[in-house]
Image (cartoon, grey):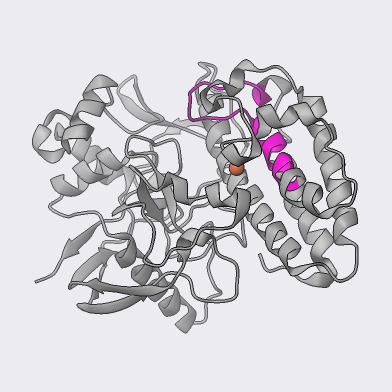
Amino acid sequence: LSLQPEEIVEQFLNIRRRSEALCAGLAPEDYVVQPTADVSPPKWHLGHTSWFFEELLLVKYQNDYKRYDASFAAVLNSYYKSAGSHWLQSERGHLSRPTVAQIYEYRAHIDRHVAKLLSQNDLHADLVTILEIGLHHEQQHQELLLMDIKVILAANPCMPAYSKSALDCAKPPSIEWSDFDEGVAQVGHDSPAFSFDNERPRHKSYLTHFSVCNGLVSNGEYLEFVNDGGYQKSRHWLSMGWDWHNEHAVKYPLYWFYKDGQWFEFTLHGAAPLDLQAPLCHVSYFEANAYANWRGCRLPTEQELELFLIAETESKNAVGEEVLHPGNSNAPHGQLWCWTQSQYSPYPGYQPYDGMLEEYNGKFMCNQFVLRGGCFATPKGHYRHSYRNFFQPHQRWMFSGIRLARDLS
Ligand SMILES: [Fe+2]
């Protein structure tokens, strides 16, 4: 996403329409349930992203703006303490109001007012900055919508499909490895183009001689770990991971199931036999770490993965291919977010956003791990190689896979 002044209204509306298009196939009942504490009802995502524009753009920059419904903030504010008290994330599915119809009316209202605001001449630079953050925020929620819709549909024993055709394509695994020299590397974002605050500043990092596998771990390779009793051997596991998988009786990746002597996987296009060639998806950090140990490898650091992704893209471009989006089946990123062994923490010299947005990233920098590379569900124009996604080590409902690394002597 790169905002062009003459197309700014159209760019805004296109991204807003895509969120609604992602939900076009849902029934009203699909919009309101919350099967697990991490998942938000689709209705909430559509409302929350609208509240974000209302609170940060309309209230601040449109003269005499009155909130559409001041009571909505208590439901649609996610976690911004500076914007007032808000409902519990884990209980969003308890609320029948605002209704789905009200949320769509609210979205239309916000779209009309923001479009009017953006139609004015000489937009203030701060306003454009906030708009850009708001649009990337909306795109983050578009990926969350797909993650959450998948949980909602999979929780139903009827196993309804979200789409008729596969959204995630199977990229054949590669057994090639890329070696990197020891030395000082520059990592992080360093250009006038958009990035989130957590990707800056660009800084030096010392890396030892390492190698990264060009392909993601496949379902077939992970099944070898399962069949070898990987989940029953404590020596592969972190202590917290061992306790987690025992406590929750985790014996294979999320969405896998075994029936009539065969492995299946719930996908966005419904239940399907497990594709052994396809990249493994929906594992926790604990599982990724245990698998890497079992293979005699390790997970990459986020700095190693950033260098690898940049080098891969450069080598693809060198042979004439377009700059690749993670959704492209030729993408070097392999179509899934990859766990790194790096704790999500501030870069040296990190400066959070000002005001309410100070709460956007910095306050989550504790007990989470970074994932890199983007995935098929990441919206076009939203991804950069410096992008730092982050989740808690037990979470696995995002589109998370494994890329192995190893030390070279
Ligand atoms: Fe949000």
Quarter of the image where the N terminus is located: bottom right
| Residue 355 highlighted magenta (yes or no) | no
Which residue shows up at 15% across the image and 47% down it? 293
- Position in image of residue 24 (x %, y %): 74, 36
Q: Is residue 23 found left or right of 192 in the rendered image?
A: right
User: 297 or 365, which is in the foreground?
Assistant: 365
Point out the quarter of the image occupied by ligand 1: top right
Q: Is residue 77 found left or right of 241 in the rendered image?
A: right
Which residue shows up at 75% across the image and 23% down it? 98
- Position in image of residue 146 (x %, y %): 57, 39
User: 222 or 60, which is in the foreground?
Assistant: 60
Which range is magenta? Answer: 30-53
| Residue 34 highlighted magenta (yes or no) | yes
Which residue shows up at 72% across the image and 64% down it? 126
Note whether residue 21 is visible.
no
Residue 238 lies, with reference to residue 402, above or below; the image says above
Q: Is residue 22 found left or right of 183 in the rendered image?
A: right
Q: How many numbered discs? A: 0
Which residue shows up at 38% across the image and 31% down it? 254
- Position in image of residue 281 (x %, y %): 39, 42
Quarter of the image where the C terminus is located: bottom left
- Position in image of residue 205 (x %, y %): 29, 72
User: 401 or 201, which is in the foreground?
Assistant: 201
Note whether residue 350 is visible.
yes
